[in-house]
Amino acid sequence: MLLENKFYKVLSEERGEGLSAKYHVAILPECNVYDGHFPEDPVCPGVCNIETIKECAILLCGVQLRYAAIKQCRLTTLATPTVCPEVDVQVTLTPTDDGFSVQASIADDKQTYMTLKGLLHKA
């Protein structure tokens, strides 16, 4: 796990039906990624959000994964550690021949920050 306990910390996990879970995470403002993205007004980089989803998918299925394809990724509004210090990462996996199809979102009670659909293969 590249970002767990550095960029984000899992506060709770709520398992759903099948391979579905909601991870309540804290975005860690002291992460050094904000030194370059932007120190005075930190913004969560989209690539970090994408990695966070993958890492939550790994927690869900217990298998190391890598992205094979991102079919759709929408960054709908800026996520920042000050505006949204805690968010929910919702992940649903559907088994495929090589791994999983993934549908995920990062949101809080007020808005959705990102949605993603893609393919994750076993690493």
Image (cartoon, grey):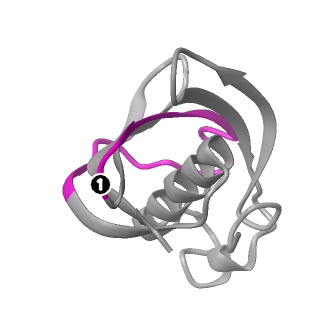
**Vertically, is 110 above or below 44?**
above
- State the image quarter where residue 114 is shown: top left
- State the image quarter where residue 15 is shown: top right
Q: Which residue is mark 1?
A: 97
> In this image, 83 relative to 93: left or right?
right
Q: Residue at x 51, y 51 (%)?
A: 53
- Where is the N terminus found, in terms of image quarters? bottom right
> In this image, 3 relative to 97: left or right?
right
Rendered location of residue 24, percent (x, y): 70, 31
In magenta segment, residue 74? yes
Rendered location of residue 63, percent (x, y): 61, 58
Q: Residue at x 70, y 21 (%)?
A: 14
Q: Residues within 10 Å of mark 1 (few under 14, many from 20)?
A: few
Q: Residue furthest left?
A: 71
Rendered location of residue 110, percent (x, y): 48, 19
Rendered location of residue 3, percent (x, y): 69, 68
Q: Residue at x 60, y 66 (%)?
A: 64
Per the rendered image, the range of residues in magenta is 71-97
How many numbered discs? 1
Q: Residue furthest front?
A: 97
Residue type at mark 1? Asp
> In this image, 66 relative to 57: left or right?
left
- State the image quarter where residue 40 is shown: bottom right
Q: Residue furthest bottom?
A: 36
